[in-house]
């Protein structure tokens, strides 16, 4: 028996209300270009909208003009979607709370997750979303997931509660030593500053 190996998220599809609410939220709040539209091929009475979250992986919404927005929070239960997180740049992240507040959208404010910063809020249909910004950039040729995996190993070896900046910095240093060549035969940490004489 063999696994069915995935290679990334192809798309995410959500049940929307009316067409304009989806456009106003996904493009008008989150800035995702509205790139494609056609009927829902499984339910001809519905429309199917496609938005680009910034990496070309599509978010799609089934809409129906007979459905009205209901802001009641989606239920949290086994098998239910809890939230979807989208990546934003640091510059954008610093503006998220202000821009949500300008629209009167309740939000969590900044939450420090150890390896990233997050802000949570709900859409007009009650679904929870997270806008996240990693605290680190991985070295060239290394993914965020690879850095996180190594940082996790360092955290558990040190019996620390959660990943912190130290684990991330150490993981990045290890990856640079593994992936970047150097003419030096000794790449151990050094201190080139002269030590002051102490009386």
Image (cartoon, helix red, strand yellow):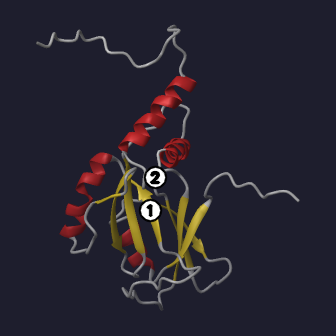
Place of residue 198 in the rendered image (x, y in percent of width and height, measured from the top left): 14, 13
Which residue is rendered at x = 56% and y = 32% of the image?
141
Residue furthest to the right: 1
Query: Could you say which quadrant of the image residue 153 lies in?
Result: top right
Q: Using residue 38 as the reference point, say whether residue 54 is left or right of it.
A: left
Place of residue 79 in the rendered image (x, y in percent of width and height, measured from the top left): 59, 79
Q: What's the mark number on residue 94?
A: none
Q: Using residue 53 as the reference point, say whether residue 132 is left or right of it.
A: left
Task: State the CA–CA distance, disc 1 to disc 2.
Answer: 13 Å
Q: What's the mark number on residue 54?
A: 2
Image quadrant holding the N terminus, namely: bottom right
Identify whether 20 is placed above or below 116.
below
Identify whether 26 is placed above or below 15.
above
Identify whether 140 is placed above or below 130.
above
Label 1 element class: strand
Identify whether 132 is placed above or below 80.
above
Place of residue 108 in the rendered image (x, y in percent of width and height, measured from the top left): 28, 69
Query: Could you say which quadrant of the image residue 87 lies in?
Result: bottom left
Q: Residues within 10 Å of mark 2 (few under 14, many from 20)?
A: few
Which one is in front, 160 or 57?
Answer: 160
Q: Using residue 87 as the reference point, say whether residue 46 is left or right of it.
A: right
Which one is in front, 169 or 20?
Answer: 169
- Total number of numbered discs in the rendering: 2
Q: Residues within 10 Å of mark 1 (few under 14, many from 20)?
A: some
Label 2 element class: loop
Q: Which residue is mark 1?
A: 85
Which residue is rendered at x = 20% and y = 62% of the image?
98
């Amino acid at each position: 028996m063999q696994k069915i190996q995935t290679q990334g998220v192809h798309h995410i599809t959500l049940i929307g209300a009316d067409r304009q609410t989806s456009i106003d939220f996904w493009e008008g709040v989150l800035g995702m270009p509205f790139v494609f539209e056609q009927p829902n091929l499984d339910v001809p009475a519905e429309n199917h909208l496609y938005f680009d979250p910034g990496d070309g992986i599509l978010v799609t919404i089934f809409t129906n003009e007979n459905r009205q927005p209901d802001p009641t929070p989606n239920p949290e239960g086994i098998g239910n979607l809890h939230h979807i997180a989208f990546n934003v740049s640091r510059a954008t992240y610093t503006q998220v709370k202000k821009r949500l507040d300008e629209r009167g959208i309740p939000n969590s404010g900044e939450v420090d997750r150890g390896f990233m910063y997050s802000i949570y809020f709900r859409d007009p249909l009650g679904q929870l979303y997270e806008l996240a910004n990693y605290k680190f950039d991985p070295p060239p040729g290394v993914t965020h997931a690879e850095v996180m995996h190594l940082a996790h190993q360092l955290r558990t070896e040190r019996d620390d509660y959660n990943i912190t900046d130290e684990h991330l910095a150490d993981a990045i240093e290890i990856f640079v030593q593994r992936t970047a060549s150097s003419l030096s035969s000794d790449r151990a940490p050094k201190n080139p500053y002269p030590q002051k004489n102490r009386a």
